[in-house]
Amino acid sequence: MLKKLLQNNIIKSSAGLLIITLLVKMLGYAEKLVLAYYYGTSYRVDVYTVILTIVLSLFYFFREVVEPGFLNVFLEAKSKGDESGAWHLFNKGIRIILAITIPVALLAFLFPESIMNVFAPGFEGDKWVLSVKLLQIAVPAFIFLALSTLTSITLNGMKLFVLPASGELAFKGFILIGIVVFYRELGIVGAIIGIIAGSIGRLGIHLVKLYDKISFRKTSVDKSYAKKAWMLTWPLLLGVSFSQVSSLTDNIFASYLQEGAIAALSYAKKVVELPIIIFPYVLSIVVFPYFSQLAIEKQQEKLKKLLADSLKWIVIAFLPIASFFFIYSTSIIEIIFQHGAFDRTSTLLTSTPLMVYSLGMVFFAIETILVIFYYANADAKTPVFVGIGCVLLHIVLTWIFIGWIGYIGIAIAFVIQKTVKNLILLGLLKNKITFDVKKIRNFLLKIAFPVIIFTLVIFFSKTFMDNLSNMGLLIKMTYMGTSFVVGSSIYLIGLRFAGVFK
């Protein structure tokens, strides 16, 4: 049954979702490319990045709380044939989100100075004035994005994955349009207008399927559903708050550093996120409902196999990708961003954090699967409290490193805390399911030699490229792509001979 499931439903859903996600990422990169072309690593990008982080922090807060707290109970109600109970829970969620986000938006509009004092205390002069102005404009996006977290996860729970992903496509598209269309008249303000329009568009697309399910009449929710949702949610309220503190803390520390530090970290993270969004994130969206269903049905062997297969393929895919990004970090940034106002200085400012982030790519990738596995098993506490501890570690390490090596310390602290978090979560899996430690060790030993060979191929190809002068960007890009394909082919052959694919 599981074999049939993997061959049909998950792969079929992943294919459609992957196409939309690739389009979303293309728009996301187009946004960064246009920002880099128009503004380089200037203070305007620093300010825009901080405002976007504040807006998305509220979005991520609701997404991380709603997804495990709501979906598990929603699916349980539907599995019992209680359709009305499931949709009463959905409408209760809408009312709760509105009750929280409307006051938050009003406070942000009325007291933007106080908020910026917290999230970017190092901003002064033009930076400060612009940040206050942009925050006031951006506040409506808080409400629409928060609501879209509930509609998105509801559609995923209905096994409709492409529609919510299309909402994200609208969000990114409107941001890009805002930057380009309003560049001359409004400057960076156009990007904020795009965020507002995109948040409305994101929710609007979701409502194409859900509008007839919405009711603002007060309806009662089954006490057992409400109790279970609350038991799953309350640890997340604390944990997700700490999680968001981590990204906001980076901006707080970086706001005191040189112009362009926030922008450089943002650009580097965007590059690292591309392969993670393409495979692990898409996979996590699709397998989460199946994890939840198998957990509810107590099919432990199938659940363990689905988790093991997911982690296995992520590790196989991301070890060589991480190696390639580390070795070619400067060239990657040069090819993607070095145009217009984004000069050689901006490239060097951005390539170093990219090199650091690449060291943590494997752990960034597996985290998406590990966390939703815990959530699917109705265990929100473990990843939450592990996350809280790691956020505190991140803040301490950032404070230590930033005085020693500047903004690069922010990237190093981020990689360390993500590595520690995932190692702990992996170690605690023994409380959920039993794994064959010997089999895991053998798997890692089998892939070690092919990874080393791949790394050597990429390293020598990079050394050869550096010895060539006057290589144009198109030729350089072709050369890098060819070296990656050759290295990957050798890597796959090595995996086959090592017996990894048996």
Image: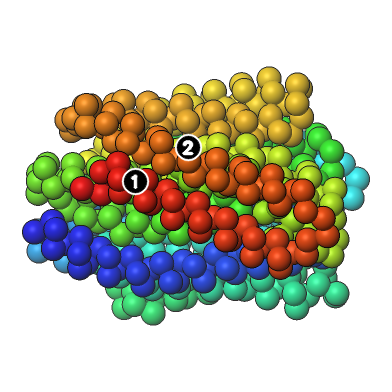
Confirm whether residue 440 shows in the render.
yes
Of 269 and 69, nearer the camera is: 269
Residue tagged by mark 2? Answer: 452
Image position of 401 (left or right of 145): right
Confirm whether residue 199 shows in the render.
no
Of 327 and 56, nearer the camera is: 327
Residue tagged by mark 1? Answer: 495
Image position of 226 (left or right of 136): left
Of 281 and 233, nearer the camera is: 281
Hey, what amino acid is under mark 2? Answer: Ile
Residue 23 place in picture, x, y as percent: 52, 71
Residue 226 place in picture, x, y as percent: 24, 47
Image position of 416 (left or right of 162): right
Q: How many angstroms separate mark 2 from mark 1 (CA)? A: 12 Å
**Among numbered discs 2 and 1, the one appearing first in the sequence:** 2
- Few, some or many C-alpha atoms within 10 Å of disc 1 (few <14, some 14-19, many ≥20)? many
